[in-house]
Amino acid sequence: MELTLLLFVRSFRERNFELCLQSLIQMAPWFFALDHHNYSRWLPIHIRDMTNLHTTHPDVCRQFKQGNFVAWKTCNRFSGMSIDQAHEQNNALVKGEGGAIGLTENAAALGRWTVGGPEMARVIGANFIDV
């Protein structure tokens, strides 16, 4: 299991979509065995969708195989990360010290944060690059 997890991380770091898919296939039985209901329910569907991507959405499949399923902060070869991890890092920068306490209770403030957050992260210096 540990090797599979390391291969999964490596697939993002190296922008290797095929390795990502293979490691997900190897991890799937573990989610059933460890009683992770949501992962065991939805991971097989995700795997099916990704393996059929070449027929359902060939342009997306081509982009993913070129490595455009990850975000990169630097040009370093091994620095790719999943899109949701990059998004969480940007959120942490935007929230800053005070966090986002009370933000969800005010619709106008939440809207400003949602629209302005990525631009604020860019200004702070957390931009991701196109490799």
Image (cartoon, rainbow, N blue to C red):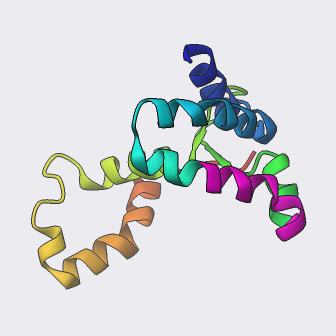
The reply to whether the magenta stretch includes residue 45 is yes
**Which quarter shows the C terminus?**
top right
Apparent side of residue 16 relative to residue 35 in the rendered image (left or right): right
Residue drawn at point x = 12 percent, y = 75 percent = 105
Apparent side of residue 46 relative to residue 114 in the rendered image (left or right): right
The reply to whether the magenta stretch includes residue 83 is no
Residue drawn at point x = 18 percent, y = 59 percent = 100
Q: Kindly report the secondary structure that dominates the magenta region of the rendered protein.
A: helix
Please give the range of residues in magenta: 44-58
Percent x, y for residue 109? Answer: 20, 77
Percent x, y for residue 70? Answer: 65, 46
- The quarter holding residue 120 reads bottom left
Percent x, y for residue 83? Answer: 56, 50
Percent x, y for residue 28? Answer: 59, 37
- The quarter holding residue 94 reads bottom left
- In the depicted structure, whether residue 39 falls above or below residue 119: above
Q: Nearer the viewer, residue 97 or 103?
A: 103
Q: Nearer the viewer, residue 42 or 98?
A: 42
Tell me, yes or no, if residue 75 can be seen here: no
Q: Nearer the viewer, residue 6 or 115?
A: 6
Q: How many marks?
A: 0
Apparent side of residue 55 relative to residue 124 in the rendered image (left or right): right
**Which quarter shows the N terminus?**
top right
Residue drawn at point x = 69 percent, y = 50 percent = 47
Residue drawn at point x = 89 percent, y = 65 percent = 55
Tell me, yes or no, if residue 78 can be seen here: yes
Q: Nearer the viewer, residue 67 or 50?
A: 50
Residue farthest along the bottom direction in this orientation? 108
